[in-house]
Image: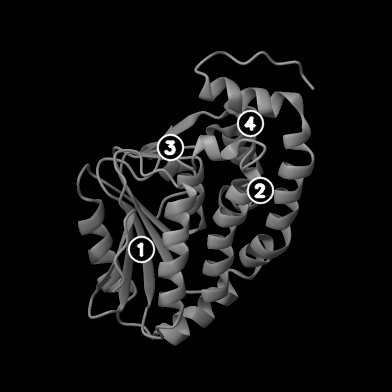
Amino acid sequence: MEEYRLIRCEKAYAGDVARIILNAPKANVLEAAMLGEISCALEGLAKDKDVKLIVFEGEGKHFSFGASVPEHTKDKAAMMLKAFHGVFYQLTAMAVPTMAVVRGQCLGGGMELALFCNFIVADSTAKFGQPEIVLGVFPPPASVMLPRKVGQTYTDDIALTGRSLDAAEAYRIGLLTLLVEEGDAWEAAKKWIETHILPKSAACLKTANKAARTHFFEGILSDLPKMEALYLKELMESHDANEGINAFLEKRKPAWKNE
């Protein structure tokens, strides 16, 4: 398989399972270069009819701290969103079932990547959060996916407070498929895959995924472009969104003008 700098793409179970491992610890930041490598890996996997499951995982102690904050500035935001959202469009078109195996921090864009997945297996160290509002911005993919995954009440809580959820709370609200002890996430995932995925047809899994995720995929294809437009045309034209990003980069408190 092709060699990458910021990810690893590996096959398991005689090619039935593909693992895309974010390989830039400790933060595994989803910067444009990493997103480009993920997109390239997905292009190759899209041509493989035998893949039954794509697994996303983070190298090291953490899944991902999220997207690159420097790439959120007004002059770079359009490029960043195009690259990030493009991964979701690719995964939607492929319709191959997906899983996230999560340890440690799973924040911002990292949580959004996990949110997209059909299945999330997390160990007890996992922390989930959408802290974008703290910077004066919002998470477009999470705004589409969270209501469909955990309902409006939890979406409002997560998106508007920016607080983090520990693994137990994430499991309680229905975000996780499995919650296991620290260090057991991949071993538990393997047992689950062997029981529930490997005995099935890759072609039938894709078709069933399209059917089961009709509403979810429609949201990605129709609502995510609207969220992207809202982000670029309204949010990034505001003072406070730019102030929040700049304050973070300059390591100071933001001076909000509420405009």
Residue at which label 2 appears: 78
The reply to whether the C-beta atoms of the residues labelled 3 and 2 are less than 8 Å apart is: no
Distance CA(mark 1)–CA(mark 3): 23 Å
Looking at the image, tell me whether mark 4 or mark 2 is earlier in sequence order. 2
Determine the secondary structure under disc 4.
helix
- According to the picture, the residue beneath numbered tag 1 turns out to be 55
Q: Residue at x 39, y 61 (%)?
A: 99
Mark number, residue 160: 4
Q: Quadrant of residue 106?
A: top left
**Residue type at tag 2:** Ala
Give the side of residue 13 with respect to residue 174, left or right: left
Relative to residue 125, is residue 100 depicted above or below?
below
Task: Please report whichever mark, 4 or 1, sits nearer to the chain's N-terminal start.
Answer: 1
> Is 119 situated left or right of 214 in this image?
left
Q: Which residue is mark 3?
A: 169
Q: CA distance from mark 4 to mark 3?
A: 17 Å
Relative horizontal placement of residue 135, taking residue 202 as reference (left or right): right
Identify which amino acid the numbered label 1 is placed on: Val
Q: How many marks?
A: 4
